[in-house]
Image (cartoon, grey):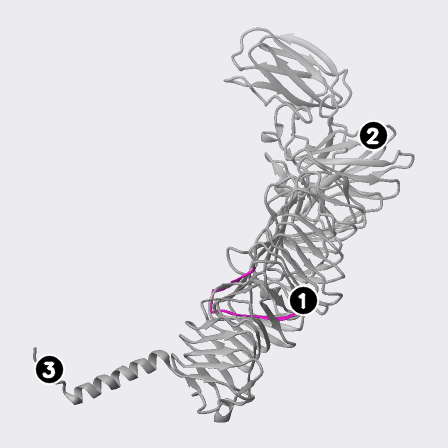
């Protein structure tokens, strides 16, 4: 077979290519033979390795030598440090993608960068001002110490013998990375700070060091830093952007929280603020995460912690050391307890609610002009006690008892809800109601706490304050405008107390069975400022010499009944003042008083005129006619009549000479009438029956004491002798099975 001759040029090119490939695969190995700089050939016993060490090149630093990097070194190949690799100031060791650092010696550089794709199997000591680890997952047994910055964007696992040590005043930046201990050690005893940047991340072991200082939240927008353990802060917590999510763990700080503070709370998380001078920035809680378990504010006298969002405290709110918790403009709900000696700063936009199921053991101390709304819903027989005056726009007592504790209560807008909550008070507390209109709900007092000093009424819109229970006023009931509606309760004015400012548009409404009780004594005129929903019907009592003294109650009823408090409403058809003065004698026997009853023209019905001869009628078994007839006394828009020597307290009304105070109208038959004449009469009273009623009519004549003084019967007509009767007013009653008629006549 004939040999083929090869082209010499092609053979040369193939040989060169082969040698190049072999050189790239095997690279160059540089072994230090002396201590010296990286760039000095003598350090290597020949040519020095390049500062960008290519893939395949190998640098070996034996045990006894120290090589100093005099420029930045980028490792794409491999560096095996058995001795020491150091650097000049500001020089960096950059382990690039594909690069590898091995050995068990010491690396001491200004900056060490461990990039994505690089490999670190080094087991010795790495000491640097700055260490930046971008490797996705690095498990190491190296002993790493940084004095300025440690930046972590991947997972760092410190396995057995592995140590990460922070130098004094250094900083850890978490750029999405985390630290895990797998037999290694995290030595964070010197003062250090932590920064969170780049994206949402979970905070971990980096916050557990005893040297923890400033923590900075710098993640973008609504990204979060989520706690994975309790955190104790001895230095500032700084917010630039992002949210700190408590995630069921506790945050305790004794320093400042600055920036735009955004916390994501949790019902299992506790927040404790022990900053001695308070917080200069408010704390905000993001929507959906506005709950905490316990909150402790312990910042000292004259200092405060402010919230800038709604917050619910499910456990204990402890405000201690005379600290202030500023909840102005926000809503705070406490479903647990309030403890400590401190205060809450509030304003008209503040909504404060206690919605627990137990007594609030700490006293509620408030500062600020007034509170927007206070809600108490802590269950029956449970109490919330004030430590300061309460000036509130809306009071919402759903359940439980608000104990005034000697402090004053001012209500500026409303009493809301229709709850069962009560107020407990003593004569040391006063209440003022200053609203634009009637309050929605009634104000109830506990049976053992139903006394106040003063009550000031200033309710606009012709509105009223409703009482849902008895109340005792020991000082002054002051009317500016509006009414006190006692409902079915009793309002007691104390022995030395008084009522001022009452008038036709401001008085005590007693028209639903309630009473105004006042203490009557000899030598003093007692004025009962009462009325119904529609009419002002005041009354006065003056006890005569020798009268028993004590408490007398008065209820002004809106109508007049034939039997005092029952029967037919005779004020619907008889001329009179449309109201009953129902006095209640709490003195007992021996009372003797002069009485004056007053009304306005709006209370006059069915042709009643105060210009006639009016009198006060007293109901015993019937309405009497022994009161002094008189022209009503006029005082401004009010009219009044008097009655002397009243010794019995029961219903009273104001009639005139045309009033027939019985339950029978003039004629109850369907046709015709009963005619009596002459009237007045001195001898005989003639009666004619034209009603069409067939059969015997029975007749009775009553005096004003309700006594029957004559009786008879007839059919169509009769002439009844009355000459034996004393002069005065009488009532003629005619009746049978078909009709009843009452007529009034006078004997002269």
Q: Looking at the image, tell me whether mark 2 or mark 3 is earlier in sequence order.
A: 3
Q: Which residue is mark 1?
A: 210
Quadrant the C terminus occupies? top right
For residue 4, the mark is 3
Task: Work out whether residue 238 or residue 499 is closer to the camera in this orientation and state it.
Answer: 238
Q: Position of residue 159 (x, y in %)?
A: 55, 63
Q: Which residue is mark 2?
A: 647
Q: Mostly what secondary structure, the magenta segment?
A: strand
Mark closer to the observer (1, 2): 1
Answer yes or no: is residue 104 visible: yes
For label 2, count other residues whose C-alpha is less than 10 Å away and answer few (under 14), some (14-19) or many (20+): some
Task: Give, as a single range, the part of the protein colored magenta.
Answer: 212-227
239 left or right, relative to 465: left
Name which of mark 1 and mark 3 comes first in the sequence: 3
Q: Is residue 692 magenta?
A: no
Q: What is the distance, in whole Å, between disc 1 and disc 2 at their CAs?
A: 87 Å
Q: CA distance from mark 2 to mark 3?
A: 156 Å
From the top left corner, tell me how far across and down residue 409 is, in percent: 71, 52
């Amino acid at each position: 077979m004939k040999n083929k001759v090869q082209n010499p040029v092609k053979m040369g090119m193939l040989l060169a290519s082969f040698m190049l490939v072999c050189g790239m695969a095997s690279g160059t190995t540089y072994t230090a033979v002396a201590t010296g700089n990286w760039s000095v050939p003598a350090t290597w016993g020949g040519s020095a390795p390049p500062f960008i060490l290519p893939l395949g090149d190998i640098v070996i630093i034996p045990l006894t030598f120290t090589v100093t990097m005099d420029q930045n070194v980028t490792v794409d190949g491999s560096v095996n440090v058995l001795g020491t690799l150091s650097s000049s100031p500001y020089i960096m060791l950059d382990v690039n993608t594909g690069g590898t650092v091995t050995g068990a010696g010491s690396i001491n550089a200004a900056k060490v960068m461990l990039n994505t794709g690089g490999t670190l199997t080094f087991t010795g000591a790495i000491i640097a001002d700055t260490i930046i680890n971008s490797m996705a997952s690095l498990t190491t047994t190296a002993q790493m110490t940084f004095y300025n910055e440690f930046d972590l964007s991947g997972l760092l696992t410190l396995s057995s013998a592995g140590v990460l040590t922070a130098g004094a005043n250094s900083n850890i930046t978490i750029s999405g990375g985390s630290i895990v201990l797998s037999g290694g050690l995290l030595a964070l005893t010197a003062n250090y700070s932590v920064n969170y940047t780049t994206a949402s991340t979970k905070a971990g072991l980096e916050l557990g060091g005893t040297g923890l200082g400033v923590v900075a939240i710098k993640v973008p927008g609504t990204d979060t830093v989520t706690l994975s353990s309790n955190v104790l802060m001895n230095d500032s917590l700084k917010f630039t952007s992002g949210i700190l999510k408590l995630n069921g763990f506790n945050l305790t700080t004794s320093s400042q929280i600055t920036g735009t503070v955004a916390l994501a709370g949790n019902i299992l998380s506790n927040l404790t603020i022990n900053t001695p001078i308070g917080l200069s920035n408010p704390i905000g809680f993001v929507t959906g995460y506005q709950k905490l378990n316990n909150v402790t504010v312990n910042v000292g006298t004259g200092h405060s912690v402010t919230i800038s969002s709604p917050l619910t405290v499910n456990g204990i709110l402890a405000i201690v050391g005379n600290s202030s918790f500023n909840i102005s403009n926000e809503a705070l709900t406490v479903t647990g307890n309030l403890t400590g000696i401190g205060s809450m700063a509030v304003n008209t936009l503040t909504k404060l609610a206690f919605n627990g199921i137990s007594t609030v053991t700490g006293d509620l101390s408030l500062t600020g002009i007034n509170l927007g709304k206070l809600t108490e819903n802590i269950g029956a027989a449970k109490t919330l006690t004030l430590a300061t005056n309460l000036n509130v726009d809306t009071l919402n007592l759903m359940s439980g008892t608000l104990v005034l504790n000697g402090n004053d209560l001012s209500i500026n807008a409303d009493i809301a809800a229709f709850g069962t909550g009560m107020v407990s008070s003593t004569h040391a507390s006063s209440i003022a109601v200053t609203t634009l209109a009637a309050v929605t709900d009634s104000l109830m007092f506990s049976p053992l706490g139903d006394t106040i000093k003063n009550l000031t009424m200033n309710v606009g819109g012709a509105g009223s304050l409703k009482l849902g229970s008895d109340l005792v006023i020991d000082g002054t009931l002051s009317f500016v405008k509006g009414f006190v509606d006692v409902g079915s309760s009793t309002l007691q004015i104390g022995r030395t107390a008084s009522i001022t400012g009452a008038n036709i548009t401001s008085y005590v409404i007693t028209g639903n069975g309630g009473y105004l009780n006042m203490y009557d004594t000899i030598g003093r005129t007692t004025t009962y400022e009462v009325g119904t929903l529609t009419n002002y019907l005041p009354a006065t009592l003056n006890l005569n010499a020798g009268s028993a003294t004590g408490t007398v109650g008065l209820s002004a009823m809106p109508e007049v009944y034939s039997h005092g408090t029952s029967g037919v409403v005779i004020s619907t058809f008889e001329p009179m003042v449309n109201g009953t003065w129902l006095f209640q004698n709490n003195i007992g026997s021996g009372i003797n008083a002069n009485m004056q009853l007053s009304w306005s023209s709006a209370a006059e019905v069915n042709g009643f005129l105060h210009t006639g001869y009016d009198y006060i009628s007293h109901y015993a078994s019937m309405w009497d006619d022994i009161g002094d007839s008189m022209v009503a006394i006029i005082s401004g828009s009010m009219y009044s009549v008097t009655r002397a020597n009243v010794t019995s307290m029961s219903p009273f009304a104001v009639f005139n000479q045309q009033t027939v105070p019985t339950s029978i109208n003039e004629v109850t038959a369907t046709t015709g009438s009963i005619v009596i004449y002459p009237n007045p009469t001195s001898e005989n009273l003639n009666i004619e029956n034209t009603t069409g009623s067939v059969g015997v009519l029975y007749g009775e004549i009553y005096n004003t004491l309700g006594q029957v003084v004559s009786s008879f019967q007839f059919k169509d007509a009769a002439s009844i002798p009355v000459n034996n009767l004393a002069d005065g007013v009488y009532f003629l009653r005619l009746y049978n099975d078909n009709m009843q008629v009452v007529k009034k006549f006078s004997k002269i």
